[in-house]
Amino acid sequence: MATLTTPALTLEQETNPWEAQASRFDFAAKKLNLDQGIWKLLRYPTREIIVHIPVQMDDGSIEVFTGYRVQHSIARGPAKGGIRYAPDVSLDEVRALASWMTWKCAVVNIPFGGAKGGVICDPKKMSQGELERMTRRYTASIIDFIGPEKDVPAPDMNTNEQTMAWIMDTYSMHMGQTSTAVVTGKPVNMGGSRGRREATGRGISVVCDEALKHLGMSIEGCRVILQGFGNVGSNAANILYRKGYTIIGITEYDGAVYNADGIDIPALIEHRARAGTINGFAKAVPADKDEILTRECEILIPAATENVITSRNAADLRCRILCEGANGPTTVLADEILAEKGVFVIPDILANAGGVTTSYFEWVQDRMGYFWTESEVNQRLDTIMSESFKDVVSYGTAHQVNNRIAAYMLAIDRVAFTTKQRGVYA
Ligand code: GLU
């Protein structure tokens, strides 16, 4: 198996998501023998927008927030990707996430490019009114660059259906008409798709099923530890639980719970809704939120944020399968350690692609003005996820590379082909 050979890196370099994305891209591009010009073109984003957004706060003062929207590629269709709100969002992070969206859409073969947005803010400290005003002003600042045929935002960390409703409304007010297809992940009553909320979690469950089949393992007795209990983590846990997996550990930013016999996930969801935290759940024992990642299990699912599996803890993992529900949870150095240990990695650009795949269905339904049932949406999603899993694994076998590099190669090849065919406009 080919692996990345990386020079010594500081932890700061190791955890820079742009560096992680770029070094995997370079490695895969080299393996593909990618044309030098296309290489340069695809290595960097097409457009990077930085806006400074004035917002009137509840106390009457004016605060100015910095926002980004990075469009990496529009070769295969409109740019596509979420918007995240967090205090530590950086341009490098948004760049990496935008590139990952391009590769992700290409891995599941949907007709989108890649984009990502971010606003530096602390949503936990803001009122609904402040969040609404910030979202609307951010939308107005990037309005020339988004649209159903240009760039279609969606939820990401700390944004949700309500955020999308505000963006859709702001855009529609400017256009003088209701334009539902400008965002995905909207509420179902205003053009959202049934199944979108659960889609990333559902996609994760499908690739886990496929990985078990591929490795000759069974759901019965398959122990899972999940990091993150937000939209992605809680839905993944719930769907896996319903399928018969044994979820033995859940870890969050403020604590972890563990039960070797399996956690009752619907009960934990109910507890969290009531208590506002997973801590204090009676039918499990508290655990250390970092140490729990290294406990023995069949599947470990990081479903929160970047840089969770690094050179510091990769050697200690005791999972057979690492299924990346988050974007960029594993560093390049950790990849090498996992490869040596023989951990079967389902890379982020495949594992969490269920969200954007159902976003694609939402965009299609909005443009048709005709809406599918939840089971139609789910069936289509299941088919795409399991076929994409098989495509990546067989590509890896054919080219003697690991799953991550296989996913990058498959995606880059598709995007490069279209980019070449379209040619360079002069
Ligand atoms: N934010 C999600 C992701 O990282 C969904 C993006 C979308 O639906 O456009 O894949």
Image (tube, rainbow, N blue to C red):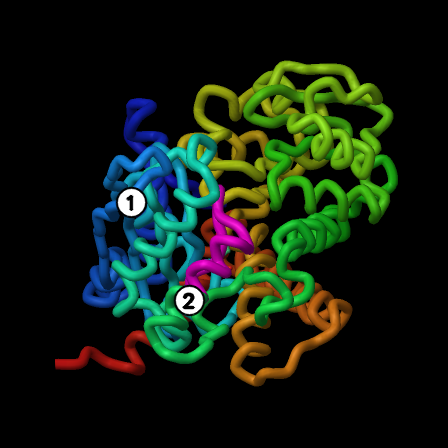
* Residue at numbered disc 2: 152
Horizontal and vertical percent for residue 1?
50, 45
For the C terminus, the image quarter is bottom left
Q: Is residue 222 left or right of residue 86?
A: right
Dot 1 amino acid type: Val
Quarter residue 290 falls in: top right
Between 233 and 319, the one nearer to me in the picture: 233
Q: Which residues are magenta?
A: 152-168
Q: Is residue 332 left or right of residue 292?
A: left
Q: Is residue 181 left or right of residue 15?
A: right
Quarter residue 173 falls in: bottom left
- Asked if ligand 1 lies within 8 A of label 1, the reply is no
Up/down of 201 relative to 150, above or below: above
Circle 2 Cα neighbour tier, 10 Å, few/some/many (<14 / 14–19 / ≥20): many
Residue at position x 48%, y 36% in the image: 305
- Asked if ligand 1 lies within 8 A of label 2, the reply is yes
| Residue that sits furthest to the front in the current view | 60
Horizontal and vertical percent for residue 422?
29, 82
